[in-house]
Image: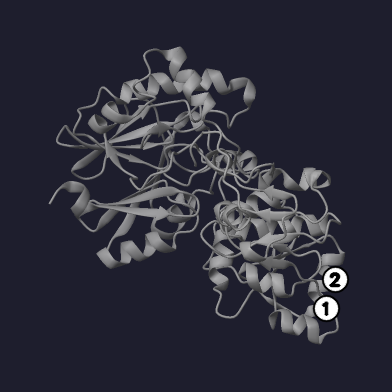
Amino acid sequence: MGFAEEYLIPLVDEGLGNSAYLVDLGDGRALAVDASRDLRALRAAATRRGLRVAYAADTHLHADFLSGAVQLAHDTGAAVLASAAGKRGIPHRGLADGDEVDLGGLRLRALATPGHTDEHLSFLLLDDGRELGVFTGGSLIVGSAARTDLLGAERTEELARAQYRSLHRLATLPDATAVWPTHGAGSFCSAPPGAERTTTIGAQKRTNALLAAPDEDTFVRRLVASLGSYPAYFDRLTERNRRGPAVLTGTPPLPALNAERVRALLADGGQVVDVRPAAEYAAAHIPGALSIPLRDQFATWLGWLLPDTAPLAFVVGDGQDLDEVIWQARKIGYERLAGHLAGGIPAWLAAGHPQASTAFVTADRAPAGPYLDVRQAAEYADGHVPGALHLELGELAARAADVAAGAVVGCGHGERAMTAASLLERAGHPGVTVLDGGPADYAAAHGTKLDATGGGAR
C-alpha cells in the first residue's frame, strides 16, 4: 500500500468541484489542506481515524469558498500555514518560497507558484527528502491549469504567463511525484471534465495540453481561450478570506418562520429561496421566490444569482436537510439566513396567501415555440436545439427582456431551467414552459437534430 492509499484522505466537494485533503501524520495528528468552512466531512474523517488536526494549510486565497483554516485553529489549535505574501489578517505562519515546516517526521516545503492568484503556494510533502506528492491548489490540475482572470481582465495575461512558469517549475519534480490539486472536474476555476482528481507529474507531462504547449505564447492563448464565466460571488470571497471568516459555534440555526414573517420579509426586500425539487416548485410556489433545488450545486447558484446582503428565507420540502442548506450557504459567505417557512407551502396556502405555478413538461408535451438554453457556453457548443437563444443562467436576470413570450426553457435535466423560469417570473415574464429533460430529448420529440459548434463541456 502506498502513502496516498494509507495516509491521504481526499475530501471531495462535488458541488464546487474541489478537493480538500486530510493527511494522517502517523502520530494521532493530521494536516488539512484547502479545507472549506463546511468541515463536516473533514471532521468525520478525522474522528474515524482518531486524528486531531494540528496544521491547516491553504494554497491560496480562495475565491470559491471560505477557508476552514480559522475554524480549525479555533477548534483544534491547528497552526495555520499560508503564504506570507497573502497578508492575511489572521494569526498564521507566513511562508515564502523554499520555507519548510517540520510536521513531525514528514516535512512540507512551500513552492511559489503564482498564476491562479498572486500569492499562490504549492506544498511539497517530503519524507526524508523524498517527494511523496505536491498539493498544487489552483496551479497544475488534472489536464489543465486553473483560471488566471480572477483579479481582473487587465491582469489575465500577466497571470497566465506566471502560471506558465509555475507549471514548468512543477514539471521539474520527479515523474512519480503525486499531484494533489484543489480544483477538479465541476469547478469553475477552469478544470476540465473527467473523473480523475489526482494525478502524477509524469502523467501530466504526457497528457496535459497546456504543459505540451511549445512556448509561453501558445500556453497563454490556450489557457485564456479556455476561460468561461464564473459565479458572481467569486469577486468577493478573496478579500473575505484575507480578513478571515468569523468563527462559528456549531451549526448556526435556521429558525422556523410563520407565513406572515416570510411575507413581510419578502415585502421588505428579503429573498425567498425555494429549495424543493423542480417538480414541487412547478406545482405551487410563493410568487417571487427563486427556485434553486437543493443538490450538490446549490451553493454555486445561490452565490451566482443572489446578493449576500439581503436576508434569506427558505422553502424546504419534506425530508430535506436544513443543515445542508445552512452549510452550503455559509461556506460561500451567506450569513443573513433568516429562517425557513414552517409547514412549507401548505402553511403558506392555509394562511390565504397567493401561489404561482410553472408548466414543467417532458419533451413530447413541450410546445414547438422559441427555445431558451440556459446552460454554460461549452455545454451549448457541444450540442443545442437549432435556432435556440442561448443565455447562460448567470446572465439571464440582466437579459430577461430578450426572451420571447411563450418560450420553452431548457438546460441539461430541468433544475437550472426551473431556476431560469423563476428569474423570468420575478422579471414580470410569466408563461414560460420548463423542459423536464435536455436538448436531445426536445430535438428528438420535434423531429430535428442538435447543432454543435464544438468546445467541449465543462
Secondary structure under badge 1?
helix
Q: Residue 426: which quarter of the image?
A: bottom right
Answer yes or no: do the residues labelled 1 and 2 have beta carbons within 8 Å?
yes
Q: Is residue 21 left or right of residue 174?
A: right
Q: Is the residue 375 above or below the residue 120 in the image? A: below
Q: Residue at x 61, y 60 (%)?
A: 414
Under mark 2, the amino acid is: Ala
Q: Is residue 366 left or right of residue 144?
A: right
Depth check: 428 or 348 in front? 428
Secondary structure under badge 2?
helix
Residue behind mark 2:
264
Gap between marks 1 and 2 measured at Cα: 6 Å
Q: Residue at the bottom extreme?
A: 350
Q: Residue at x 34, y 50 (%)?
A: 21
Q: Is the residue 209 above or below the residue 214 in the image? A: below
Depth check: 49 or 261 in front? 261
Depth check: 63 or 240 in front? 63
Q: How is the image coloured?
A: one colour
Q: Is the residue 442 above or below the residue 163 in the image? A: below
Under mark 1, the amino acid is: Glu
Depth check: 34 or 342 in front? 342
Q: How many marks?
A: 2
Q: Which mark is residue 417?
A: none
Query: Residue 250, image x and y in percent?
Result: 51, 68
Query: Residue 325, image x and y in percent?
Result: 58, 66
Q: Residue 232: which quarter of the image?
A: top right
Q: Is residue 227 left or right of residue 136?
A: right
Can residue 207 be spotted in the picture? Answer: yes
Residue behind mark 1:
260
